[in-house]
Image: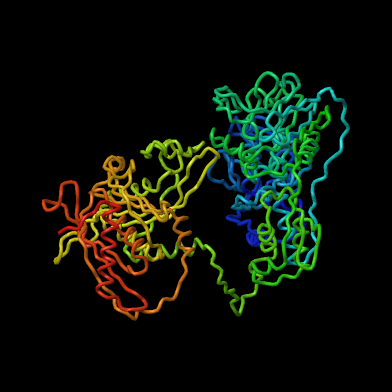
Amino acid sequence: MKISYNWLKNYLPIQNSVEEVSELLTSVGLEVEDVQALETVEGGLRNVVIGEVLTCEKHPDADKLNVTTVNVAGEAPLQIVCGAPNVAAGQKVVVALEGAELLPLGATEKFKIKKAKIRGVESRGMICSEKELGLRDVHEGILVLPSETVAGTSAADFFKIENDYLIEIGLTPNRSDAFSHIGVARDLKAVLNVRKNLNLKLQLPEITTWQTANTKRNIAIEVQNTEACPRYSGISISGVQVKPSPDWLKNKLKIIGVQSINNLVDATNFVLHEFGQPLHVFDADKITGNKVIVRNALANEKFVTLDGTERTLKGYELMICNEAEPMCIAGVFGGAKSGITESTTNIFIESAYFSPTSIRKTSFGHNLRTDAAMHYEKGCNANITIAALKRAVSLVLELAGGEVSSEIQDVYSTKKEKAIVEIEFAYIRKLSGFEIEHNTIVKILNELEIEVLEQTATGLKLAIPTFKTEVTRAADVMEEILRIFGYNNFELPTKINSSISLANEKDETKFEQTLANLLTGLGYNEITTNSVSQSAFEQDETLRQQQVKLLNSQTSELDSLRTSMLYGMLESVAHNQNRKAFDLAFFEFGKTYHKTENGYKEHKHLALLLSGNKMSPNWISTADKVNFYHLKQAITSVLSKLGIAQTIFAESADTALQNAFVVTKNNKEIIVGGEVANTVKSIFSVKGDVFYACFDFKALLNEFSQNKVIYKALPKYPSVKRDLALVVEKNIAFGTIETLAKKEAKSLLTEISLFDVYEGEKVEQGKKSYAVSFVFQNSEKTLTDEEVEKMMNRLVATFEREIGASVRK
């Protein structure tokens, strides 16, 4: 955002230097990124004055040159040789004196005026054209001024040349209230009054009153989409004259980088940068039916904008139309047919409030990033449309003449009321760590025009002005207080205050850090991939139906939010493999996004990925390629660290994975994983085996939060170990055996593990043998052999009954 230092001082009577102003603005969150000293004409026309040509005679040695004497109100007239064909005695002209430096329009370097001899005749200055002065690109000879102009007047004063500073502010998205000169002045007033104990007042522009000559130009307004256009205001002016703007207005706009168009357009641009309210001027004679209709565009409707480009509308754009056709893309860009021209005499000025979402979507959809669009999409003040309209009318009447020919038309569907926010003094103290006097808090709020409705011993009830669109909560009010009070004004504490809480709350950040530390210790590296992905990556038809597509994707490929963590991780694998890095162990925390019947859902995950070698080859061992069991080891480590037991690993089906598995706890799926399918790897040109697992983060957190640390004494009595070989059907997982054993033996079974799996000639076809180790222990006595044998027999009977197992002989 560009702010003129001189323009700013129109609203606030300050004597502070531009450096002081920049420092104060930065301290309140309006970060000043650059300050440039500027002049509306390069060089400021120093040593350039108004002169009167006293005599003009032909040069004795050159047909196209004249020798003049010019009165510049100095000690004596100057002799100047001039080659302009239109120079004549009696004229008032602009004279560049010796030492003046000029930069003509189109030139890249200045030239300095020196005393010289031209064809033998001494010349002590130069009579200038507008182009040589850097004013306008004209070629009619020297600039001749009105006869009443006083000789000796400084050209800088005559042309109202401004010396100014351009302050560039990096405006954050939450500060739409400061997206104007008055908005910045409001913050500057507040900080000066609070920190310097001043009593400055904002000097808002006076709005000239006018008489409505007649109402023959009343333009009716119909708003069909009140959600996208909650308020639309307008007024008609007849008999205007379109012409160039005066120098003061041109200079104001030039300083902030806005090109002067004509007096009408410049007036609306001035109000935009003064109030922060965009306006638009229509040729009233081109409003068919004397009616403005605010509606959505029709799909594939054609519309020619001011730049002469025919655009195909998509149907979501908000359009300003007359009874016959569209006139303007609302809040974004005007139309070629309805715009003002040099012959325009009757106008209709629009001042509206459009939905930020609607404007942003249209602006990006058609790649039209106008000043008006950027103001609307940040959020304007719906309650300022009339004030801005009146200011524009005052300027138009001053600059273009004419008469107001209608009443102000205003369609306001749902009035935007002030937000009511309550804030406790204890809350302010807790967040700031500092006791700010209550009177100081109230003064800050008053300076920011936040109304204190009620004050008690414990807090405040506030009414937030509608121009502060982002202030809706106590935390927002807190930020307003702190930035004006000054973060640098807090004393450094000499002690640390902390609270000790034994509440069993779910702390996602701490939980995530615990998992990250564990996985880092296991040799994994954390990565972060883009949550915006390519819809073509998704292989699962169900997930394809759930994809959340982007309406205005920046590229044709990145067109949807990811439905799986896998594809972004595979892109990282491909990126690393292309750079000769093949041994990869990644983990990532992230969200997937899914469309549902009732809207959208986000799911947080922890994803693991392994590829290449677990251990690189060295002098003592060969390479150890990653496999399923390396992945399972990491999964088991995570579950063990979190104290999550009694989980079941089972086979599963997954479009993107082969040999897929699922891990459940209490019949709830918490992990899916497997080896990435070759068809998926080929999409990314990934080489070698890749193993992947995805944890349901919320399910993990819920299970973890339910765990309680319980003291358990070391066992007094010895444990007993027994091994058993069971022949089962191939489709029986070890997890089934584990579950049955724990259910039967209960607390006596302290450990069960699988130490061998056999398939071959010694077992029946279609079956396999599990070698299982059981550890029994009683906390109250020593188990006898008879008790252990009895328990083993019960287990064998359970296995035979439930899964058809037999003991291998």
Left or right of 442, for residue 228: left
Task: Pick whichever, 353 or 121, lies toward us.
Answer: 353
What is the quadrant of residue 366 in the picture? top right
| Residue 124 seen anywhere in this rendered image of the structure | no
Residue at the left extreme of this rendering: 761
Task: Pick whichever, 698 or 378, lies toward us.
Answer: 698
| Residue 600 seen anywhere in this rendered image of the structure | yes
Residue 462 in percent (x, y) is at 76, 57
What is the quadrant of residue 399 in the picture? top right
The correct choice, above or below, for 346 with respect to 725 in the image is above
Left or right of 577, for residue 81: right
Task: Pick whichever, 573 or 566, lies toward us.
Answer: 566
Q: In which quarter of the image is the C terminus?
A: bottom left
Q: Residue at x 43, y 43 (%)?
A: 563
Residue 722 in percent (x, y) is at 23, 68
The correct choice, above or below, for 620 with respect to 363 in the image is below
Left or right of 302, for residue 78: right
Residue 192 in percent (x, y) is at 73, 62
Task: Pick whichever, 734 or 591, lies toward us.
Answer: 734
Q: Residue at x 60, y 50 (%)?
A: 173
Residue 701 in percent (x, y) is at 47, 59
Q: Residue at x 30, y 53 (%)?
A: 802
The correct choice, above or below, for 202 with respect to 546 in the image is below
Q: What colour scheme has been applied to the protein in the rendered image?
A: rainbow
Left or right of 492, for residue 351: right
Count how many numbered circles sit on residues in the image. Answer: 0
